[in-house]
Amino acid sequence: MIFLDALDVSMVGVALPAIQHDLGLSTSSLQWVVSGYVLGYGGLLLLGGRTADLLGRRRVFLVALGVFAIASLLGGLVDDGTLLIVARFVKGVGAAFTAPAALSIITTTFPEGPERNKALSIFTACGASGYSLGLVLSGLLTEIGWRWTLLMPVPVAIIALVAALKVLPRSTEERAEGGHDLIGAVLITASMLLLVFTVVQAPEAGWTSPRTIGSLVAVAALLGLFVFAELRMKHPLVRLGILRSGSLVRANLGLLILMGSYVAFQFVAMQYFQNLLGWSALGTALAFLPAGLLVAISSTKMGDFADRFGTTKLATIGAAALAGGYAMFLGIDERPSLGGLVIPGMLLLGIAFALSFAPLNIQATNGVNDDEQGLASGLLNTSGQVGGAIVLAAVSAVLSSGGTTLSIDTLRSAIVVSLVLALVGVAISATGLRARKPAVAEQEDAKVLETV
């Protein structure tokens, strides 16, 4: 599933300028082609993860993958921007049930430790491979017609569905006890949708306008009701006690920043390369390719690196590389240097993903009981997807504030948003390094006592 998700994200990203031109979408409307998918995905991931725990991971994976394939087909056939956004949202809903089921199948199949770390590093490599392949294919297909970039995931999803029917054993359907928390799912989805809509519309309505302030108050109220409901539900969508794990919280914040900042940066870069510089879709795709290839090549080794150096150190270095990559792109102008700016910047972003993604997945699922692996997986994926939607909305607002004509200064301002988030990610990850020191000291003391 991560292969399909990465394939879709990279292909749609490259095709966005062509979609905008053909359907006559504004910049703020265009971002909903991405956000519609991300919100359907992120808004229902928690429900998807819990459903996988309750109904069986294999069953949920297969049904949701079928929905994903159908929605992909519909998205490639529609002629209206609104219908495309709706199809993308439904597609995201399918992914919301498929992704946590897939990840929890891995984490419940392999025991915590080197075996699981290796499996998760391969999982990451599949995502990077899907992203890299999507870049190349989207560049070629967009030259023919952007619809083919939306239709391409259909045969891949069908092949994955047939393979899953044969490969996934029914024994993975170990079910947890409990029921569905539909109230919690409705509240968290409504709050995320309203938050993104508010941020996107704020430049037009005014950040201090009654509509914007009222919407933000409503978002806070919905989130408060969600927490209130979860504390009183017999079988909550999110058992809030799981958030007592510092490593799980840091992993979720880390992925929120990683995905949020990058989805927003990709949107800005597509506008820069194609709309401002006039690059072709294929040329733009090739500019992003070094990062994807670097992650694909190195990801299978991340499990071994995590065993040797620890996930926290890798994630911290990765966050610093992410900030470095965005900082380089602040030097963009009308004639960017491929060797001095574009390729080095993209390679830094590739290093960031290679060092961060698998370790964050390991952090988020270690120490979690098997009957809550779907919940832990859903939380992590929710953080990444909702982070992408919110940061993309903020960046879209920055771009729209510059008027209908793109400028270098406006693009730089949008990149600053991603850079600031990456720096926050470095600080958050570094707290994990400090938190580990007492535990390490205790282990060393114990060893000394044993030798005495």
Image (cartoon, helix red, strand yellow):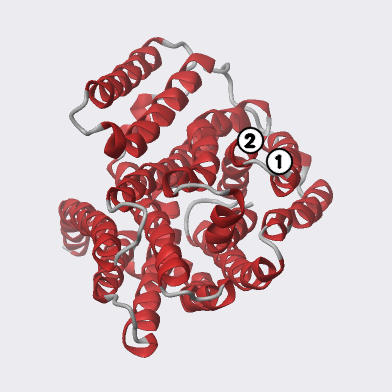
Question: In the depicted view, which residue is nearer to us: 27 or 219?
Answer: 27
Residue 435 disc label: none
Report x, y in % for residue 413: 23, 59
Three-letter amino acid code at the position of disc 1? Ala
**Mark 1 or mark 2: which comes first in sequence?**
1
- Is 400 on the left-hand or right-hand side of 96? left
> Could you tell me which residue is drawn at 70 percent across and 42 percent down?
68
Asked whether residue 305 appears in the rendered view, the answer is no
- Is 423 on the left-hand or right-hand side of 219? left
- Residue picked out by circle 1: 71
Question: In the depicted view, which residue is nearer to us: 231 or 366?
Answer: 231
**Mark 1 surroundings: few (<14), some (14-19) or many (≥20) residues within 10 A:** many
Q: Are marks 1 and 2 in contact (CB under 8 Å)?
A: yes
Asked whether residue 279 appears in the rendered view, the answer is yes
Task: Report which quarter residue 296 is drawn in.
Answer: bottom right
Report x, y in % for residue 240: 36, 25
Task: Report which quarter residue 48 is drawn in.
Answer: top right
Q: Secondary structure at mark 1?
A: helix
Report x, y in % for residue 231: 35, 14
Residue 90 disc label: 2
Three-letter amino acid code at the position of disc 2? Val
Report x, y in % for residue 52: 62, 33
- Is 449 on the left-hand or right-hand side of 22? left
Q: How far apart are labels 1 and 2 at the CA level?
A: 6 Å
Farthest residue, direction bottom: 339
When the figure is inspected, residue 343 is found, relative to residue 21, above or below; the finding is: below
> Could you tell me which residue is drawn at 29 percent across and 70 percent down?
321
Question: In the depicted view, which residue is nearer to us: 210 or 178?
Answer: 210
> Could you tell me which residue is drawn at 46 percent across and 38 percent down?
376
**Mark 2 surroundings: few (<14), some (14-19) or many (≥20) residues within 10 A:** many
Q: Secondary structure at mark 2?
A: helix
When the figure is inspected, residue 98 is found, relative to residue 284, above or below; the finding is: above
